[in-house]
Amino acid sequence: MEIHEFFVEGQDQSRSHVLLHITEPSTPQEEAKGYFFALAEINNGTIEQIQHLQQMIDDLESGYYETDDTEDKTAFEATLEFINCRGHHLLQFEDSLIHCLVGVIRDRELHFAYHGSPQAVLFYRKKDNELEAVDILGAPDNLLNNNQLFSSILEGHLNLGDYFYASTPHVNDYFTLDRIKKIVETRNARQSAGHIQKVLDDIKSDLSFGGIFFHLPTYVDLPKTGKTPKSLPRGTVESLNKMISREKNTAEMLSPSLWRRVNKRLNTRLAVYRQKHQTATLDRTQTKRQKQISKTMEKGKIETNVRPRQEKINEPILNIILVSLGKSLFILLSSLWRLLRGSTILLARTSVALFFLLTNRDNQRETIRKEWRQAYDKKKDDFFALPLLSKILLILTIVLAVIFVGSLTTFKLKSAYQAKKIAYENQIQAVIDKKNAADSSLLYNDEARAFILLAEAKELLDKLIQDSHLEKEKASQLAADIETSLTHLRKWQEISPTLIADLNPNQAKVEQLIIIANQILAFGPDDKHLYRIEPLSGQINSLDASLLPKLIAASVPKENDYAVFLGSNGQIAKYDPETQILSQKDISYPQVETKILSPAIYNRRLYVVDTQNNQIYKHSPIQTGFDRGTAWLEEELNLSDAISLAIDGDIYILKTTGEIWKLADGLKQEFNPSGLDPQLENPRMFYTNASLNELYILEPKNKRLVILDKTGKLLGQYTSPIWTNPTGFIVDNEKNIFLLDNNKVYRFAWK
């Protein structure tokens, strides 16, 4: 077993303090118990709380090595229950937070418990010898449990080649899990710990940091000896699953009777253990890393990782703290009073002198000047009256003070620059990692995941602070690379469509198109004519449509034998392509007050949307038109913002928000479009039918026609610089697209 730790003491111990404790067995009895370790961080803790936590760790270590296993529980479980019963006082300190992880490694079996949000990560090698990282704790949820110190025990097995890594929470601010993994892949355990410690030490943060690496080496990890391992070590996924499945709830095991038994047994053992350490040296060799608390006690400084080996002083610690606080408070208040008094007198004298100097009241200006000149001359004479050595020392003191202040300022600026640089490098590396992951996803045709990763990378890059020219240049290059990949995913194409008809000479006001009997009909609510256009020749004929005013939409069945037009008042008319006559037809609706839009014909039945009553009506044909219709939806849905309907067997609803719903048998189905960027804004029209395999969406704001397959995957986006405000389109069975823009009809093909 290789054990390497790192520890960095922060500049503000009252804000963050770390305890690091590792015990290595030396005797056969202790070797049977294995290694004991503890890692804790206290934020905004007091000296008393830190001492209590250190004592708790010492008692947990002593109890573990002095307690025997039983049939129903291990020594670690029994000791942890005892500590839980007497450790409530550690959580009673207001405005403080404890993150703690304690555990043992025994014959490669790992047992540990935690409180707060420390980090525990398992690195194991897969079959291809690649290192894999698993965050064991994830996001701990016992942080809010103020009544229980350790609420559960996790157990697992470490295999050859595995790394078990534990650290205090604030290490995550500078080392992500991916970065730790890269460090472990390129360095051994000792070098990894040393590298992390050096980086954290250079930051000069107010926070303290600590962590431990446990490693079981294999042939892969040892220097080359010419030997080849017979097989790679098996993965640790099974061990991890075992660790998770064997989590034990210690809170449920703490009954009053059990507490009395454990308390009596462990108190006896702990008393014997401490007595031994007062009269003789330890039999066990302990490796304990020591750091100091910035606040001093009566004699010397507190050692955070060394348990006292002699009797404590008789005077209660509370009395010592109160006396020290009293003295500190008296000195502080006295200093503040003297400073305030001197500053007030100096300010008053200066103000009076400036008043007389500026106003020359009672002719005092010259007097003030003489006093200041005399004071200056006196100071100068006093300086020249000093012995040469005193002059040299005074000048040297001033120079050293300037150098000290300059050095301190430079050091602070350098530390801030280093911290900022590290943060920038971490952020830029995160962007690069996401960009590389997106490129890898594209290799496997996982466009949805690639798009998400690129969007996240772009968001991170937008938040990146860029100061220097080099940083701006690097960020610009990354932004260009990301935009190139996004452009590829967006499938954005700029086309040059063919103009087949211009209705402006006819003074038309058309907004929609339909195609029937190989002819295109253009119409609009503000135009009393239908315009029949020959697609090949572009010839335009005008038909009277005043019978049904304000035509807003139309639909043609697959038989292509008539077209149904919908007026703004919910009335309908039928167009006969042979006679080229538009005649009004009967129709009624289940509700009196309605707002009908977007007709669509399927299997000779007419479907319309009622946005006022949130319903879709199905109308069967009758001799004079269509019947009263029945409600088709089987569930309550909000259709108030629906804009267009299309049918291919299933019904698709397009909403003004850009959302697309798929409905079947009157119920909403799961439908999630992917890869669409930018998202739809105020789309106008939606089209498909049973003969087409695609969904077509027109969005005037971005002057684009979006094409999806019927699973929601993006197939293409088309735009043209000659389009100004496209309002309607239609697609024939050969996938020729006819688009209406500013009374002009364009044609282009999609394949």
Image (spheres, grey):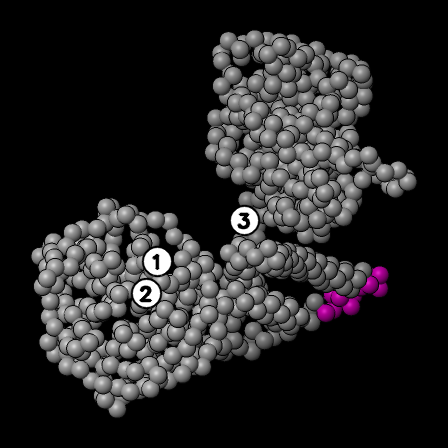
- Label 3 element class: helix
Of the numbered discs 2 and 3, the one sitting upstream in the chain is: 3
Q: Nearer the viewer, mark 2 or mark 3?
A: 2
| Left or right relative to 44: residue 741 | left
- Kindly identify the residue that appears in the image at 72 percent across and 43 percent down: 128
* Residue 337 circle label: 3
Rendered location of residue 347, percent (x, y): 52, 62
Query: Does residue 336 lie above or below 258 as drawn?
Result: below
- Kindly identify the residue that appears in the image at 47 percent across and 77 percent down: 494
Rendered location of residue 541, percent (x, y): 23, 85
Residue 389 forms part of the magenta stretch: yes
In which image quadrant can residue 557 be found?
bottom left
Marks 2 and 1 in Cβ contact (< 8 Å): yes
Which residues are drawn in magenta? 380-392
- Kindly identify the residue that appears in the image at 56 percent across and 73 percent down: 368
Residue 320 forms part of the magenta stretch: no
Q: Nearer the viewer, mark 1 or mark 3?
A: 1
In which image quadrant can residue 457 be found?
bottom right
Query: Does residue 373 lie above or below 691 as drawn?
Result: below
Q: Nearer the viewer, mark 2 or mark 1?
A: 2
> What residue would you read off at disc 1?
660
Instruction: Answer yes or no: is residue 27 visible.
Output: yes
Of residues 727 and 372, the one nearer the viewer is: 727
> What residue would you read off at disc 2?
686
Rendered location of residue 542, percent (x, y): 20, 85
**Residue type beneath disc 1:** Ile
> Label 2, label 3: how many angstroms apart (C-alpha)?
79 Å
